[in-house]
Amino acid sequence: MSHKKTLIIILGPTASGKTGVAVELAKYLNTEIISCDSRQFYKEMQIGTARATEKEMQGVPHHFVGNLSVMDYYNVSMFEKEALSTIENIHKNSDFAIMAGGTGLYINGICNGIDDLPDPTPETKEYLTTLYRENGISALQDKLLEMDSAYYKKVDLNNHKRLLRALEVCMSSDKTYTELKTSPKKERPFNIIKIGLNMERSEIIERIHHRTDLMIKKGLVEEVKNLEKHRDLNALNTVGYKEIFEFLDGITTLERAIENIKTNTRRYAKRQITWFKRDESIHWFHPNDIQKIKDFLS
RNA sequence: GGUGCCAUAGCUCAGUUGGUAGAGCAAUGGACUGAAAAUCCAUGUGUCCCUGGUUCAAUUCCAGGUGGCACCA
């Protein structure tokens, strides 16, 4: 290992035991944990996001957990800047920092960085969402063909979020989204080691089901009820919350809502696995093999 | 006990005027640089309940059986 400090990233699908491994390693290396979970930022969402309890944290400082309100706006770029500075601070006192989480895009933001793109004005965003709402996706496709034909050729034309984003960037600059999105691999002043946690799909499924039942026992319905007034916010467009809203609306039974949470969590885990699979720099372990992970790190 | 209806994919169901079959959901694979626990794309899945009859050919028609539902008693 060079003179550089190191960032150890613990990643993997939901319910793969990242929390436990991260805390264990943080104690072993006497350092702190940076969470990288796009839903654990929100202080009002605790049970449904399976946030670690004080007891589970075992006194290890955690950053980016419950640090935002569901009403706050947040994005990868903001996380990149803030997390980088937190890592720098941790590295002042330790050779290691640990990041743990399952949000692939945010992990990429830390490892490789993301382009500094112009911020669209609220008017631009409003204009585009109205265009989409009133004229459908074909209006967005037409506009993109006009503004950035190169991106038009490679985007998923059915994915309105991708179209909306490309358009808002184009409209906020003289350049096209394609020209601005250079995807540079930003150099980081530290080494990065990625530890992936995974297990048999059936085992993950079992853990997801068990964890969901536990959330209900801990009072998930009550937590969601208290957030009902915020249900239209992005933060609440989250597995575990939207299904309970359906139950509160009387659209489904509680049993059905619980089943839906389990199904949607399984699908979420599958998407995470797909995302991480293509990253060949990840070293995979079973979460129970904590000793093997320690051996690997030394 | 009687009558009627139903039995098809893991689930809910459609369909075949007789030539061995689809949809949705699930599942699986994939994409993804400012909403990412989001959003989007692709792909299968079968003793068509059992036994016999009619027929060149039955998942389809007929009879019986089994199971389910409804109504009557």
Image: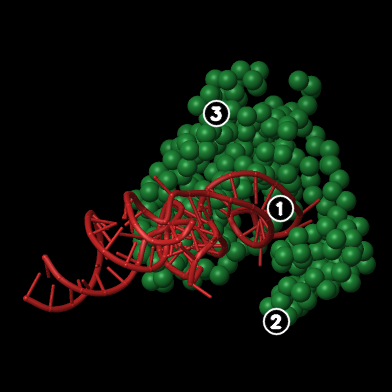
Chain colours: A green, B red
Mark 2 or 1, nearer chain start: 1
Which disc, if any, is residue A23?
A: none
Name the image quarter holding the N terminus of chain A.
top right
Density class for disc 1 (Cα within 10 Å; few <14, some 14-19, many ≥20) is some
Respond whether the residues carrying marks 3 and 2 are from the same subunit. yes
Q: Which residue is mark 1?
A: A76
Residue ID at (72%, 37%): A279
Image check: B61 left or right of B65?
A: right
Q: Callout 2, which amino acid?
A: Glu
Viewer-nearest residue: A65 or A255: A255
Residue B34 place in picture, x, y as percent = 73, 59
Q: Which residue carries the number 2 mark?
A: A134
Could you tell me which secondary element the residue under label 1 belongs to?
Answer: helix
Q: Is residue A251 left or right of residue A169?
A: left
The residue that mark 3 highlights is A286
Q: Are marks 2 and 1 in contact (CB under 8 Å)?
A: no
Image quadrant occupied by the C terminus of chain A: top right
> Could you say which is closer to the camera, residue A214 or residue A93?
A214
Amino acid at dot 3: His
Q: Quadrant of residue A70?
A: bottom right
Q: Decide: is A15 above or below A3.
A: below
Percent of width and height locating residue A21: 54, 31
Structural distance between the alpha carbons of marks 3 and 1: 28 Å
Quarter occupied by residue A9: top right
| Same-chain status of marks 3 and 1 | yes
